[in-house]
Image: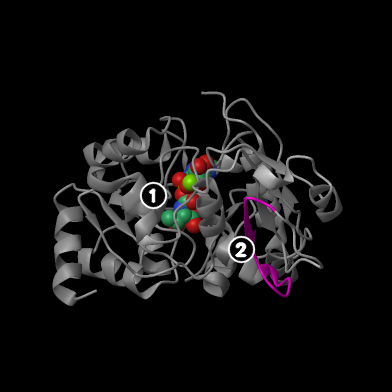
Amino acid sequence: MTSAEMRRAAEVLRSGGLVAFPTETVYGLGADASNSEAAARIFEVKNRPFFDPLIVHVGSLSHALKFAEFNATALQLARQFWPGPLTLVLPKKSGLADLVTSGLPTVGLRVPAHPAALDLLETSGLAVAAPSANPFGFLSPTTAEHVRTFLGNRVDMILDGGECSTGVESTILDVTGSVPVLLRPGGLALEAVRSFIGDVRSALMPQDRPSAPGQLDSHYAPRTPLEILSFDRIAADPRLSSAALLLARDPARALAAHAVEVLSPDGSLRRAAQNLFAAMHRLDQSGARIILAEPVREEGLGLAIMDRLRKASCRRAV
Ligand code: TXA
Ligand code: MG
């Protein structure tokens, strides 16, 4: 994108508009995080419930320090993993619209590792509230085309930065206490956090009032129903010919299905994560009656992939 485009995007944000922009994880739907009317438009456009708080994006750790209290652990994590796919939930200071944090005393902050996102944050000088740029509960966008297809003219501007390199949303850690708590597995492997900081607890339990979308039963869902089955059970499934297959790696033998997507030919989980949402988008549009998905190993980015597949396999109760 050109620098004129970037200046225009910054101007749209400063005047309360919505800009969809690329990050290394997924595309975000951004608004000025200090402007409650702009933030309200995000919820409206996404059809997102107001109790589900937004992640605030900043260009640097020093900018982040204005908006939240960092304890020693939080500082270490930010210095190690920012810019990058890690969101830290911290006690918030002033300066952010209450709506952005759904009235919580905490805020989720991250510095994205994408040149266009960093440029936008720097050019605008703003903290930018941005959930993934998709209708609530639906598949996340990893290309500008996904955003155009599903939000299109409901946003003021879409910055096209190509395909997202990580492909799954940020890992969310609550760092308000002494031991970090995992609220959502994501683009930063839990192993990397553990080997750097030691103990991390997991809070991936269903709750009435979710503190992260990983705790809502159904999320990241295609319109086509999705089931998770082993390769052998997929191969023997009576619905095979009318099914769309989401395979973890190149299959041992070809299967005569309606459509097939391979997440990663050689089984690399990084590659699989990068392809996940784009492959699900294509299968969802293939006209198949059902998507049959092969599970991946639950290590590294496989934790985030399986989390998204499980959420996608819950039919939405709307
Ligand atoms: O990779 C990402 O994180 C992407 C890109 C655009 O940065 N954003 C993203 O946003 O995934 P979203 O809205 O789809 O997911 C953000 C989730 C919220 O659903 C919310 O539950 C959690 O982060 N979150 C935000 N602030 C929180 C807080 N104060 N306490 C607990 N959870 C919070
Ligand atoms: Mg989302």
Residue displayed at 53% across by 63% down:
167
84 up-or-down from 242: above or below: below
In the picture of the structure, the residue carrying the numbered disc 1 is 133
Residue 275 seen in this snapshot: yes
Q: Position of residue 91 (x, y in %)?
A: 49, 47
The residue closer to the viewer here, 148 or 214, is 148
How would you rate the neighbour count of disc 2 (Cα within 10 Å): few for under 14, some for 14-19, many for 20 or more?
many
**Mark 1 CB in 8 Å range of ligand 1?**
yes
**Dot 1 amino acid type:** Ala
Residue displayed at 14% across by 63% down:
8
Q: Does the magenta segment cover residue 266?
A: yes
The residue closer to the viewer here, 258 or 229, is 258
Image quarter for residue 185?
A: bottom right
Q: Main secondary structure of the magenta part?
A: loop
The residue closer to the viewer here, 288 or 28, is 288
How would you rate the neighbour count of disc 1 (Cα within 10 Å): few for under 14, some for 14-19, many for 20 or more?
many
Label ID, residue 229: none
Is disc 2 placed on a helix, strand or loop? helix
Magenta residues? 257-269
**Dot 2 amino acid type:** Ala
Residue displayed at 27% across by 66% down:
120
**First in sequence: mark 1 vs mark 2:** 1
Is disc 1 placed on a helix, strand or loop? loop
242 up-or-down from 162: above or below: above
Q: Position of residue 76 (x, y in %)?
A: 58, 69
In the picture of the structure, the residue carrying the numbered disc 2 is 273
Instruction: Describe residue 123's horizontal placement relative to residue 60 as left or right.
Output: left
Q: Position of residue 183 (x, y in %)?
A: 63, 47
